[in-house]
Image (cartoon, grey):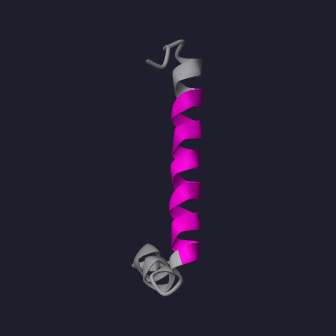
Amino acid sequence: LSGRGAFRRFKDVLSNYPEKRQEQFAFKNERLKKCVMEWLEENEIEFA
């Protein structure tokens, strides 16, 4: 994926595959959660 509008095209293709779309959202959410938890730990902030 590259170029202007690449993510939009990716999302458009995923809309034709609901199972894969759900997998992508789950992956994105887990990755974001991991990044946030690592940042909190690095900055010695307790997750509440």
Check if residue 25 falls in the magenta segment.
Answer: yes
40, above or below 13, in the image: above
Residue 1 in view of the camera: no
Q: Quadrant of the N terminus?
A: bottom right
Quarter of the rendering occupied by the C terminus: top left
Residue 37 image position (x, y, % from top left): 55, 29
Q: What stretch is highlighted in magenta?
A: 19-38
Q: Position of residue 36 (x, y in %)?
A: 51, 33
Location of residue 39 (image quadrant): top right
Residue at the far front in the pictured view? 19
| Residue 26 counted in the magenta span | yes
Left or right, residue 18 beside residue 8: right
- The reply to whether residue 42 is in sight is yes
User: Which is more toward the observer, 42 or 47?
Assistant: 47
Horizontal placement of 26 versus 5: left or right?
right
Residue 35 higher or lower than 46, as above or below: below
Viewer-proximal residue among 8 and 46: 46
**Residue at horizontal 45 percent and vertical 73 percent from the top:** 7
Q: What secondary structure do most residues of the magenta stretch adopt?
A: helix
Instruction: Give the image location of residue 27, x and y in percent.
Output: 59, 56
Residue appearing at x 49%, y 87% in the figure: 16
Q: Which residue is drawn at 40% across and 77% down?
A: 8
Residue 45, x across and y down, in percent = 49, 14
